[in-house]
Amino acid sequence: MKKLSFFLMLLSSILLVTWCGKKQDTTTVQSLIEDGDTVAVNYTLSLSDGSVKDTSYQDIAEKNAILATGRVYEPLKFTIGQKQMIPGFEKGLLWMKEKESKKITVSPEDWYGLKDDKLVQNVSGSVFTEAWITPKVGDVFNFQFAPWKVLQISWDIIVIDFNHPLAGESLIFDVTVESIVKWVPTTWGNTAQ
């Protein structure tokens, strides 16, 4: 019995020394973006022709002559699934991990849609004269947060395109995930700290 006990202790010691002597795996499983997580991403938005339309990087904005006065260029922060961003953009971020970079292409159907010919309409010029505005072809106006563009002026009729200026365009986002704050469900009524 003493021999068996001694043998088991010796075997345990050998296994313990062997286990402790192995190099420990220090890699950790990175969090992946899921619905409800709050993320911060840097991005550059381009169209299919390569023109840069927006970015969170000041140097890229300067280089492409789209620098906005007073804007703070920093990562964009929002919560996935809260409809703060266009759906195709959010969908492209799902399952990305921190510091991962990716190109996300969003089709027109996943944001402003295709151009709608019914949204090109004739408007009386008096609408502009009453507002003391002299429109020119190519002018873009914002009305109730919706941009519209003057396409043609003839006599007292002005042709306006009420489509969003980027309707029908695919958006190409070059994104890098800077941080992920995981969504943690709360338990109502639980006052334990």
Image: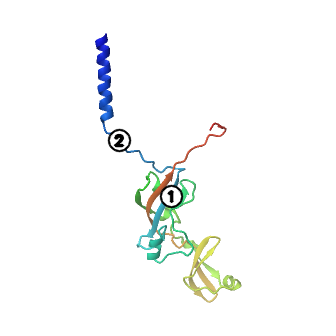
| Secondary structure of the residue carrying numbered label 2 | loop
Position of 182 with respect to 158 (left or right) is left
Would you call the spot at circle 2 few (<14 residues within 10 Å), some (14-19), or many (20 or more)?
A: few
Q: Is residue 13 above or below residue 4?
A: below
Q: Residue at the location (68% across, 82% down)?
A: 127
Which quadrant of the figure contains the C terminus? top right
Circle number at residue 118: none
Q: Nearer the viewer, residue 8 or 157?
A: 8
Q: Residue furthest top?
A: 1
Secondary element at image label 1: strand
Residue 129 to residue 13: above or below:
below
Residue matched to label 1: 40
* Place of residue 90 in the rendered image (x, y in percent of width and height, measured from the top left): 50, 57
Disc on the earlier residue, 1 or 2: 2
Relative vertical location of residue 1 with respect to residue 53 in this rendering, above or below: above
Marks 1 and 2, Cα distance to the nearest angstrom? 29 Å
Residue 112 locus on image (x, y percent)? 53, 66
Residue annotated with mark 2: 25
Q: Residue at x 46, y 64 (%)?
A: 43
Q: Position of residue 159 (x, y in %)?
A: 59, 81
**Picture layout, residue 43 above or below residue 126:** above
| Occupied quadrant, residue 44 | bottom left
Q: Amino acid at mark 2?
A: Asp
Which quarter of the figure is the N terminus placed in? top left
Residue reaching furthest to the right: 130
Q: Nearer the viewer, residue 90 or 137?
A: 90
Picture coordinates of residue 33 (x, y %)? Answer: 47, 51
Q: Residue furthest bottom?
A: 155
Residue 185 in view, yes or no? yes
Amino acid type, mark 1: Ala
| Residue at (43, 76) in percent of width and height | 63
